[in-house]
Image (tube, rainbow, N blue to C red):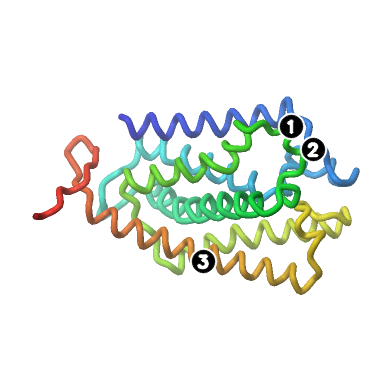
């Protein structure tokens, strides 16, 4: 019951923010051409791609709670459980990457990632919904749920498909508008831009493997009860 409520609550929080953003918030764009981009121009931000992914994941998890299975390793998992577990492998990596990348760059120079014009629209609460709670929620999920990671081939294929789709759109935006979605790219030359992207992809791979390893560790330390709840196994003395 608590797990179902958790998934539903996260879905409501994220989707409410996304709806509010689309209906009421006006974000200044660097160029006029960017104002006509899909999703009220928010489609150019990896942050929004990640938040939409988290929202979808928790909706699928909620549906799995109702009609699927939360068993540790079901022999014949329902389709929705397979989708949920594969989505988790991507959602975990994306959330950790977005949070660490945003707050890391923010600590060095806020204007490179969150200039004053954006900060006036996105209050601290909205900023944390986009860049902080995504990681808090996905870590809670990791520590309290049974996740059956897909094969590394499937998981990494899903992750890099997600990344490739965003990067393709990222460069399409630059070609169409002549401006970069993130100011930090204005400060870099072309070799540095490609280097930044290559390092980002490698870091994403590292985060994927870390998530996979942590999941394996925490899964082995959980006891499942007949009501579906979990609790850490007591340590042997």
Give the secondary structure at mark 1: loop
Residue 43 % position (x, y): 71, 46
Tag 2 near tag 1, CB within 8 Å: yes
In screen coordinates, is 77 left or right of 158? left
The residue under the point 30% across, 29% down is 1
Left or right: residue 175 compared with residue 85: right
Circle 1 residue:
121
**Sequence order check, earlier mark of 3 and 2:** 2
Determine which of the numbered discs, if any, sits on residue 117 in the image: 2
CA separation in Å, label 3 and label 2? 33 Å
Q: To which residue does mark 3 refer?
A: 205
Give residue 162's position: percent from left, percent from top. Answer: 59, 57
The outermost residue toward the left is: 237
Work out how far the residue at label 2 is from the one at label 1, CA to CA, in angstroms: 7 Å
* Residue that protrudes farthest toward the front in the picture: 108
Circle 2 Cα neighbour tier, 10 Å, few/some/many (<14 / 14–19 / ≥20): few
* Circles 3, 2 touching at the beta carbon (< 8 Å): no
């Amino acid at each position: 019951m608590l797990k179902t409520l958790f998934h539903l609550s996260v879905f409501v929080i994220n989707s409410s923010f996304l709806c509010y953003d689309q209906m009421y918030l006006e974000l200044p764009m660097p160029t006029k051409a960017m104002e006509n981009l899909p999703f009220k121009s928010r489609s150019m931000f990896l942050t929004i791609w990640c938040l939409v992914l988290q929202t979808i994941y928790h909706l699928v998890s909620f549906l799995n709670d109702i009609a699927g299975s939360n068993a540790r390793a079901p022999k014949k998992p329902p389709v929705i459980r397979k989708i949920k577990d594969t989505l988790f492998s991507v959602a975990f990596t994306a959330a950790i990457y977005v949070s660490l990348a945003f707050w890391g760059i923010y600590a060095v120079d806020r204007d490179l990632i969150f200039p004053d014009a954006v900060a006036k629209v996105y209050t601290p609460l909205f900023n944390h919904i986009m860049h902080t709670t995504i990681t808090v929620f996905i870590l809670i999920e990791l520590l309290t749920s049974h996740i059956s990671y897909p094969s590394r081939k499937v998981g990494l294929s899903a992750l890099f498909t997600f990344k490739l789709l965003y990067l393709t759109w990222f460069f399409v935006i630059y070609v169409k508008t002549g401006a970069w979605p993130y100011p930090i790219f204005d400060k870099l030359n072309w070799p540095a831009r490609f280097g930044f992207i290559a390092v980002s992809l490698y870091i994403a791979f590292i985060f994927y493997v870390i998530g996979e390893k942590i999941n394996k560790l925490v899964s082995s330390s959980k006891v499942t009860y007949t009501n579906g709840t979990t609790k850490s196994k007591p340590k042997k003395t």
